[in-house]
Amino acid sequence: MGEVINLRQARKARARAGKEAQAQENRARFGRTGAEKQRDADTAERDDRRHEGHRIGPHTEDDKDPDGGTA
């Protein structure tokens, strides 16, 4: 014969487990400190500036048409 369980307790235990899983996901998603957020923002800004610094400008000698206009 199977084990006798209290359905109310089983339902509440399942709800608690679901809430704990959601809390753990939220901690991973939103649980960063202000310093960590600032560090990531600074890194992203530095990377963007570095990327833009290597961009070739629109008005170089290579962009001119043979008839004297620009491309």
Image: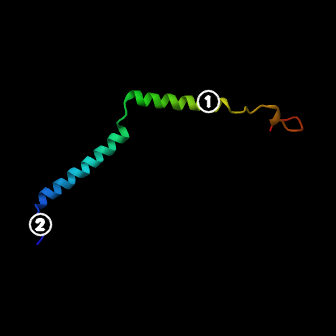
Q: Position of residue 32 (x, y in %)?
A: 37, 34
Q: How crowded is mark 2: few (under 14 residues within 10 Å), some or many (20 or more)?
A: few
Q: Residue at x 52, y 32 (%)?
A: 44
Viewport quadrant of the N terminus:
bottom left
Q: Which residue is drawn at 79% across and 31% down?
A: 60
Going from N to C along the chain, the mark reached first, 1 or 2, is 2
Q: In this view, does 56 lie to the left or right of 7?
A: right
Viewport quadrant of the C terminus:
top right
Name the residue nearer the viewer: 13 or 4.
4
Above or below, comparing residue 55 to residue 21 in the picture: above
Q: Where is residue 13 in the image (x, y as percent from the top left)?
A: 18, 54
Q: Which residue is drawn at 51% across and 30% down?
A: 43
Residue named by callout 1: 50
Say which amino acid is labelled 2: Glu
Residue 30 in which image quadrant: top left
Q: Residues within 10 Å of mark 1 (few under 14, many from 20)?
A: few
Evaluate if marks 1 and 2 touch, with contact meaning CB atoms under 8 Å apart. Answer: no
Q: What element carries label 2?
A: loop
Q: Is mark 1 on a helix, strand or loop?
A: helix
Q: In this view, does 15 lie to the left or right of 35?
A: left
**Front of the two marks 1 and 2:** 2
Above or below, comparing residue 10 to residue 70 in the picture: below
Question: Can you name the residue that lies furthest to the right here?
Answer: 67
Q: Is residue 45 left or right of residue 65?
A: left
Q: Position of residue 41 (x, y in %)?
A: 48, 30
Q: Position of residue 26 (x, y in %)?
A: 33, 42
Say which amino acid is labelled 1: Arg
Above or below, comparing residue 1 to residue 30 in the picture: below
Q: Which residue is drawn at 72% across and 33% down?
A: 56
* Label number found at residue 3: 2
